[in-house]
Amino acid sequence: PNLLQHVSMVCPEAGNKVHWVPQGFDKNFSDSENSSDGSNISFANDKIIFGYFGTLNRNNPISDILECLSKFNNEVVVIVIGDGDQKESLTRKFALTNIIFLERMDQSKLFKIFEKVDICFDALDNRISKFGTSRYKTIEYLLLSKPVLHYTSVKGDFISAYNLGWVVEFGDINALNTSLIKILKYSKEDLSLMGVENRRDRKSTRLNSSHE
């Protein structure tokens, strides 16, 4: 988000030459009804479903979130989709919990499965990113009309900047547990409405800014 400031510090003479090029997506693909539906996977309708997709490695340190969510076994189901060098250890650690690990899959099937998810989560511990970050995963979560729980050490976070969910300081386990308790007071309907409003508001913000 603060790319201009970063470039100005690293290379002052180039600071006024920075231009944003928006990263788009194929709306026809995201709205398609012809993708695999993931109907062979069933979830408890009475539990809040948390979801994550992405690489399972040190750059995406979701272990703390999984640890906290595993304590709410009677209230939540957790879906984790992806591969990576930490998948084996995470699968072993949370084998007897409410956490379901699935293999990496094509985006069409993944998006269909995530229609059943109530809230998405992400984790990022990158203390050198004081100028903010633009995670494409966040864009995909919002494209899916989901509120987001972001566990991060990065300042200028996209989620907090636009009030799109909950942001917890990376490493603060007590704050993470407190946020989860607050989230679980929401109904599935409330979370769904929040996600739809997030997507609508972001579209409105993008359209308004493009005409300024």
Image (cartoon, grey):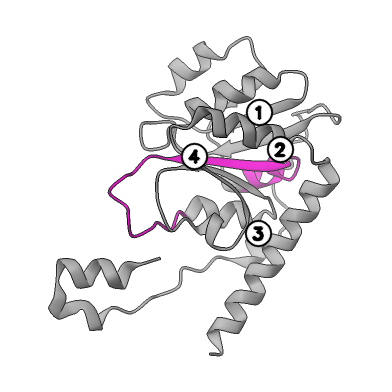
- Dot in front, 3 or 1: 1
Q: Is residue 18 visible?
A: yes
Could you tell me the amino acid type at mark 2? Lys
**Secondary element at tag 3:** helix
Q: Which residue is under mark 4?
A: 54
The percent coordinates of residue 142 (x first, y second) are: 62, 56
Residue 78, disc: 1
How many discs appear? 4
Q: Which residue is denoted by mark 3 in the rendering?
A: 30
User: Which is more N-terminal, label 4 or label 2?
Assistant: 4
What element does badge 1 sit on?
strand
> Alpha-carbon distance for marks 2 and 4?
25 Å
How crowded pointer 3 is (Cα within 10 Å; few <14, some 14-19, many 20+) is rated as some
The residue singled out by tag 2 in the image is 182
Q: Quadrant of residue 203?
A: bottom right
Relative to 134, does residue 81 appear above or below in the rendering?
Answer: above
Q: Residue at x 66, y 66 (%)?
A: 28
Task: Please name whichever residue, 151 or 144, is drawn nearer the observer in this view of the structure.
Answer: 151
Quadrant of image for the N terminus: bottom left
Q: Is residue 167 magenta?
A: no
Mark 1 or 2, nearer chain start: 1
Which residue ends up furthest to the bottom in the rendered image? Answer: 212
**Along the line of sight, the residue nearer the viewer: 147 or 154:** 154
What is the C-alpha distance between the residues marked 1 and 4?
Answer: 14 Å
Crowding around mark 1 (Cα neighbors within 10 Å: few <14, some 14 to 19, many 20+) is many
Q: Earlier in the sequence, mark 2 or mark 3?
A: 3
User: From which residue to which does the magenta span run?
Assistant: 108-135
Does 87 sit left or right of 3 as displayed? right
Q: Marks 3/1: CA distance?
A: 23 Å
* Whether residue 33 can be seen here: no
